[in-house]
Image: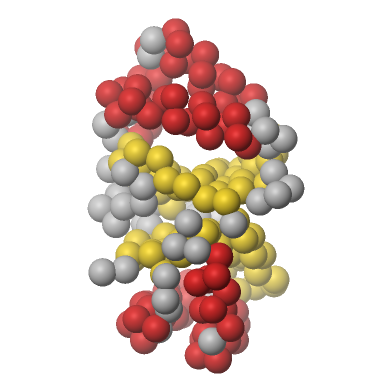
Amino acid sequence: MFLQVLQGTVGDARALREQLDSWVQDHAAHAEGWLGTTAGITEDGEFIAVVRFDSTEAARRNSDRDEQGKWWSETERHFEGPVQFHDYPNAAEFLDGGSDDAGFVQVIQGRSSDVERLITLERDLEQSLRELRPDLIGGTYGWDDQGHMTQTAYFTSEAEARKGEQGEFAAPENVQRANEQYRQLITDMRYFDLRNPWLRSAQ
């Protein structure tokens, strides 16, 4: 799987949402390998979108389409300032992956010098997470060769997610220890809370 993340400060939120809807309606069927898009705007006006493709090659072919270039030239006008892009050729899912049923999505970005260790910890925690965090549907994570990473977590609702966070303090010692190791492996962490996530997946 391949992830592309784009983010920037929104100028016209309504127009941007219309552009995203138009992409699914008019372009998604022609975007070979597109798996889904998760997007939203934080309360301070930061837009972030995580786009999933089944491969790097499929994402590149989509970017090279003339129709995609035209759509983007119209879309970027609705941002204030530059838009950042992050390409993650290394990507994977955890638990049930991305879900259009999520009521709340949290995107976490940061850097790590040992991404492989992060993934191992994530895998080791999966069964415990299923039992301890029923609010967590699943998610995705992607990383590049410089250690920059983006993780996207899909929750049933924000209220349940906050409740689940508090419950982690009562988790078994081995789970708490693994969570602490996980956090120590990530630096420069940023959180993006999407309270009204825009969720679309390929049929």
Is any part of residue 159 visible from this angle? no
Q: Residue 121 in the image: state x and y as whole percent.
A: 51, 26
Say how many tags the image has: 0
Q: Is residue 83 left or right of residue 13?
A: right
Q: Is residue 24 above or below residue 69?
A: above
Which residue is at 67% across, 47% downward? 148
Q: Residue 168 in the image: state x and y as whole percent.
A: 40, 19
Looking at the picture, the colour scheme in use is: secondary structure
Q: Quadrant of residue 202?
A: bottom left
Which residue is at 33% across, 25% downward? 127
Residue 52 versus residue 85: which sits nearer the camera? 52
Residue 90 versus residue 139: which sits nearer the camera? 90
Residue 163 versus residue 175: which sits nearer the camera? 175
Residue at the extreme top of the image, as rendered: 173
Q: Is residue 148 left or right of residue 139?
A: right
Q: Is residue 181 above or below residue 81?
A: above
Q: Residue 110 in the image: state x and y as whole percent.
A: 65, 42
Q: Residue 200 in the image: state x and y as whole percent.
A: 33, 65
**The C terminus lies in quadrant:** bottom left
Q: Is residue 68 above or below residue 85?
A: below
Is any part of residue 19 visible from this angle? yes
Which residue is at 54% across, 87% downward? 65
Which residue is at 52% across, 59% downward? 2
